Image (cartoon, rainbow, N blue to C red):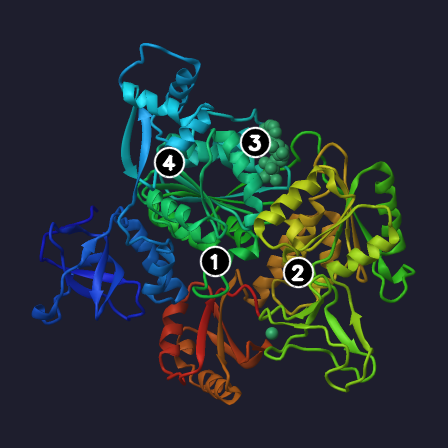
């Protein structure tokens, strides 16, 4: 189906980014407009951004209908993108205007394109050729088709700007004004492919064939860290580029992208477009526009890159598909992995989900025959998987307030002697999770949340990890007023840094935790320095578990392998299993084999045993059987409802009423649990109550939820958020 064109004055229906519950009719502007056009429309006294969604309904006084102010200088939104926004809105129970806001998050979309002076190859040849002139012409020829600003061109040619200007006078270089947002340089799919191992070659060829089918399909690409998954999916990207379609690679952490962009450049000769919070506003706008007009072939980005207006999307790679950061936890609550599959299905594109430790959801979709699966079984080249072992903490002799067991200490000492790196892993930021008064037993909590304040000694403050509130460390107990009795209880990474420094005074120690660095750039630079050998012992949170390469690292010591197992979260076992495998995967990526040691008080816990045995399939089958029996995801469906308000009575009253008036849910056989205080019952001064809805797979859950929630009137200050397929239960 092709998009319609509306003549001047015809009625069109426009979706705006404003929080209205319907679309509005306008008259098509002078010159008409296409369906999907990005437009500016008058709304009351304001002008707002919108998209021409279709033909106007004409159910409004024609005399009062105003005209579209103007059509914006951007490619119209394709039909598949409009369908995607509607389906995503339905799935997440999000109003459509909020989805459109997600899809237009680039500044200055309404601005006219500003121009800049650019330089290209001209038609004349200068009669006198100098080295400097030749160098300028060579750059323009080498980058055929690209245009440069004066400064860029002079710099790339290694000449002064006067040389370029001289060539302009001679007609050998042309000078013209072009829009500031320029196309991205063309990527060459055949630039730098590596010779693949047999496993890799088989995987790459399966993905190429899938792409050539020109239809939707999803493939789970599973392989241990370092097995060469990235090389394989870059081959799929190459095939996608050859077919003239666009590709998107989603990454979970911006910390990953620096290393990754360099790698992409090595493979395709040029840098791809980037989309994440670290990208400048100008670059965001360029990316958005170029993606829309098909002049960005490959986007590497964070989850919201999924909502860019692709012209002709052929492939979406979701790297580290199990990563929890793919779930957006505020605003529009969506899971980028699931939305990637939806987007691809509506566009006829392929999805590659890559992971060493797939989510149970994806594993189950493979079992059910919905996804294809490719396995890379060995590490690439000489690197082998680390040996896994447990340190039984019940038998270790350790004084209170110390966490590095004598066994682990001996292993680290051994690595130091050999000049190899060790990683001490503890997934807890700050110095100590609890500050306790030894006189009265009071624990310092946040004033606005039901959470303990975490001491950050580096910042010299206490911090609430829920709301970010900080306060100075008091010298007297806020409860009993006794001085000098406040004590740090439990370890955080900063405290581990202290303990390790005391154990190994001559070692170079680096503590890596997201809050110790002012910017993603600073963190990236620091990680690169450490990877190059700038530290003997690395102490880190889960930040280091993700994708970074530390070639000299041969030992990983996990301080508290039991930590993740304590929660009541239905994914506690899955998360622990994934995290431990990822962390262990950091060891021994180069030629030296690695070793991963888990400190645990429960060496016989089934999850710990599965980790030690490296028996992923066994673990997944057991976990799947338990979840199937309990009828929980991925074998059943869930939705979380969070009610929050400054008024505690109101949230409980409404929660109770919702639980009683559950007929729309019972109609589809769904059950509602709660209301119960949310695990963190107060955040930023708002009291939080949650209800949990459980349903069978395949029932129309969203429609039932909408009907159910629609029965209630919310008090002014009360917020209701619906979280479909909740990932976290805080
Ligand atoms: P994964 O994505 O599974 O963690 P990578 O693709 O990052 O694995 O590969 C691990 C390392 O091995 C990287 O340094 C990569 O450059 C290298 N590598 C992988 N495949 C090849 C290959 N076919 N030829 C040369 N080097 C390779
Ligand atoms: Zn707080």
Q: Which mark is residue 213?
A: 4
Q: Secondary structure at mark 1?
A: loop
Pointer 3: what residue?
A: 200
Q: Residue at x 66, y 45 (%)?
A: 527
Q: Foreground residue, 115 or 78?
A: 115
Residue 664 sits in which quadrant?
bottom left
Give the CA distance from mark 4 to mark 2: 38 Å
Earlier sequence position, callout 4 versus callout 2: 4
Report if the CB atoms under discs 3 and 1 are less than 8 Å apart: no
Residue 415 numbered tag: none
Tell me if the residue at label 2 has its CB under 8 Å from ligand 1. Answer: no
Point out the tag, 1 or 4, that comes first from the N-terminus.
4
Query: In the image, which disc is placed on residue 573?
Result: 2
Q: Residues within 10 Å of mark 3 (few under 14, many from 20)?
A: many
Tell me the crowding category of disc 4: few under 14, some 14 to 19, or many 20 or more residues within 10 angstroms, Cα based. Answer: few
Q: Is residue 605 visible?
A: no
Q: CA distance from mark 1 to mark 2?
A: 20 Å
Q: Which quarter is ligand 2 in? A: bottom right
Dot 2 alpha-carbon crowd within 10 angstroms: few under 14, some 14 to 19, many 20 or more: many
Residue 220 versus residue 327 in the image, above or below? above
Q: Residue at left 61%, top 48%?
A: 522
Q: CA distance from mark 1 to mark 4?
A: 27 Å
Query: What is the x, y in percent for residue 72?
Result: 24, 51
- Horizontal relation, residue 36 to residue 366: left or right: left
Task: Name the residue beneath numbered marker 1.
Answer: 335
Q: Are marks 1 and 4 in contact (CB under 8 Å)?
A: no
Query: The residue tagged with tag 4: helix, strand or loop?
Result: loop
Front residue of this view, candidates 163 and 330: 163
């Amino acid at each position: 189906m092709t998009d319609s064109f509306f003549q001047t004055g015809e009625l069109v229906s426009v979706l705006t980014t404003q929080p209205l519950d319907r679309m509005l009719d306008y008259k098509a502007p002078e010159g008409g407009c296409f369906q999907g056009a990005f437009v500016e429309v008058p709304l009351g006294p304001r002008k707002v951004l919108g998209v021409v969604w279709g033909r106007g309904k004409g159910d409004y006084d024609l005399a009062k209908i105003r005209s579209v102010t103007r059509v914006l200088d951007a490619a119209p939104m394709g039909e598949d993108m409009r369908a995607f926004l509607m389906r995503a809105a339905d799935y997440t129970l999000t109003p459509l205007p909020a989805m459109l806001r997600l899809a237009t998050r680039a500044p200055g979309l309404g601005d006219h394109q500003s121009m800049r002076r650019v330089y290209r190859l001209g038609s004349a040849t200068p009669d006198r050729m100098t080295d400097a002139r030749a160098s300028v012409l060579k750059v323009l020829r080498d980058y055929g088709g690209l245009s440069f600003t004066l400064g860029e061109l002079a710099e790339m040619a290694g000449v002064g700007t006067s040389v370029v200007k001289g060539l302009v006078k001679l007609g050998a270089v042309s000078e013209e004004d072009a829009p500031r947002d320029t196309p991205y340089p063309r990527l060459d799919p055949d630039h730098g492919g590596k010779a693949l191992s047999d496993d890799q070659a088989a995987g790459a060829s399966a993905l190429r064939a899938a792409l050539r089918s020109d239809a939707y399909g999803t493939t789970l690409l599973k392989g241990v860290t370092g097995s060469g998954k990235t090389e394989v999916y870059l081959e799929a990207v190459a095939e996608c580029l050859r077919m003239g379609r666009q590709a998107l690679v989603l990454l979970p952490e911006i910390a990953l992208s620096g290393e990754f962009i360099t790698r992409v450049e090595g493979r395709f000769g040029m840098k791809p477009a980037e989309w994440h919070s670290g990208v400048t506003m100008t670059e965001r706008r360029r990316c958005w526009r170029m993606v829309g007009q098909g002049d960005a072939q490959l986007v590497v980005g964070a989850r919201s890159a999924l909502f860019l207006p692709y012209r002709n999307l052929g492939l979406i790679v979701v790297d580290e598909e199990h990563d929890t950061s793919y779930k957006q936890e505020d605003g529009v609550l969506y899971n980028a992995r699931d939305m990637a599959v939806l987007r691809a299905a509506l566009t006829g594109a392929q999805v590659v989900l890559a992971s060493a430790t797939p989510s149970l959801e994806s594993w189950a979709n493979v079992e059910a025959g919905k996804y294809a699966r490719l396995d890379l079984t060995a590490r690439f080249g000489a690197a082998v998987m680390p040996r896994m072992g447990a340190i039984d903490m019940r038998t270790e002799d350790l004084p209170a307030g110390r966490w590095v067991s004598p066994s682990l200490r001996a292993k680290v000492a051994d690595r130091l002697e050999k000049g190899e790196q060790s990683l001490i892993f503890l997934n807890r930021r700050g110095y100590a999770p609890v500050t306790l008064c030894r006189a009265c037993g009071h624990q310092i909590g946040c004033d606005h949340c039901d959470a303990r304040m975490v001491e950050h000694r580096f910042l010299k403050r206490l911090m609430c990890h829920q709301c970010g509130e900080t306060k100075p460390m008091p010298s007297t107990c806020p409860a009993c007023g006794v001085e000098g009795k406040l004590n740090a209880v439990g370890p955080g990474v900063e405290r581990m840094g202290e303990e390790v420094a005391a154990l190994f005074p001559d070692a170079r120690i680096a503590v890596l935790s997201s809050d110790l660095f002012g910017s993603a750039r600073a963190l990236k630079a620091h990680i690169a320095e450490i990877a190059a050998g700038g530290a003997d012992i690395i102490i880190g949170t889960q930040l280091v578990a993700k994708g970074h390469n530390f070639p000299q690292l041969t030992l990983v010591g996990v301080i508290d392998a039991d930590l993740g197992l304590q929660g009541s979260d239905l994914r506690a076992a899955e998360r622990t299993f994934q995290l431990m495998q990822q962390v262990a995967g950091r060891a021994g990526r180069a030629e030296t084999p690695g070793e991963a040691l888990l400190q645990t008080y429960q060496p016989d816990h089934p999850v710990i045993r599965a980790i030690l045995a490296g028996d992923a399939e066994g673990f997944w089958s057991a976990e799947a059987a338990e979840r199937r029996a309990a009828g929980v995801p991925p074998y059943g469906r869930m939705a979380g409802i969070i009610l929050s308000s400054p008024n505690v009575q109101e949230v409980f009253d409404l929660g109770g009423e919702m639980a009683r008036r559950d007929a729309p849910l019972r109609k589809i056989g769904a059950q509602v649990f709660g209301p119960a205080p949310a695990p963190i019952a107060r955040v930023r001064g708002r009291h939080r109550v949650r209800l949990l809805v459980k349903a069978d797979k395949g029932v129309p859950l969203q429609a039932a939820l909408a009907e159910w929630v629609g029965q209630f009137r919310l008090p002014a200050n009360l917020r209701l958020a619906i979280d479909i397929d909740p990932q976290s239960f805080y």
